[in-house]
Image: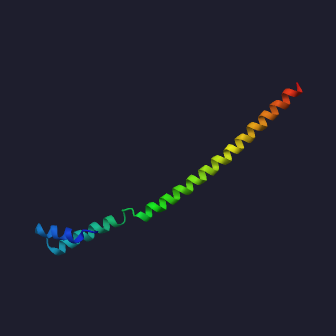
């Protein structure tokens, strides 16, 4: 906690003992420590999102190629059937 000393002084100014004020700081620090997101956490998420986005784009590209192939085969088959009749 960056402003721990300031917080302790404010609490002391209201009549709370130094020991109690330090206990407040310790409790608040422990509560917040595990729940705050760091810049590194955000960078890691960005990397994961980029990886997922890349995989989705690759999948879309493959699906487009497959769909194009299916349409081409369907047109070729329809053309062949029409020529037979």
Viewport quadrant of the C terminus: top right
Of residues 56 and 12, the one nearer the viewer is 56
Furthest toward the right, the residue is 84
For residue 75, what is the image quadrant?
top right
63 displayed left or right of 72: left
17 displayed left or right of 42: left
For residue 4, what is the image quadrant?
bottom left
- The correct choice, above or below, for 31 with respect to 18 in the image is above
Q: Give the image's coloring scheme.
A: rainbow
Q: Residue at x 16, y 67 (%)?
A: 10
Q: Position of residue 36 (x, y in %)?
A: 36, 62
Q: Residue at x 37, y 65 (%)?
A: 34
So how many labels did they put on this image? 0
Q: Position of residue 64 (x, y in %)?
A: 67, 43
Viewport quadrant of the N terminus: bottom left
- The correct choice, above or below, for 77 with respect to 16 in the image is above
Q: Position of residue 27 (x, y in %)?
A: 27, 68
Q: Position of residue 44 (x, y in %)?
A: 48, 62
Furthest toward the top, the residue is 85
- The correct choice, above or below, for 35 with respect to 69 in the image is below
């Amino acid at each position: 906690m960056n402003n721990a000393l300031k917080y302790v002084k404010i609490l002391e100014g209201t009549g709370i003992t130094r020991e109690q004020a330090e206990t407040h700081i310790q409790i608040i620090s422990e509560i917040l420590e595990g729940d705050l997101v760091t810049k590194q956490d955000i960078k890691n998420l960005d990397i994961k999102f980029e990886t997922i986005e890349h995989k989705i784009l690759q999948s879309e590209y493959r699906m487009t190629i497959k769909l194009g192939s299916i349409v081409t085969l369907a047109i070729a088959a329809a053309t062949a059937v029409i020529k037979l009749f």
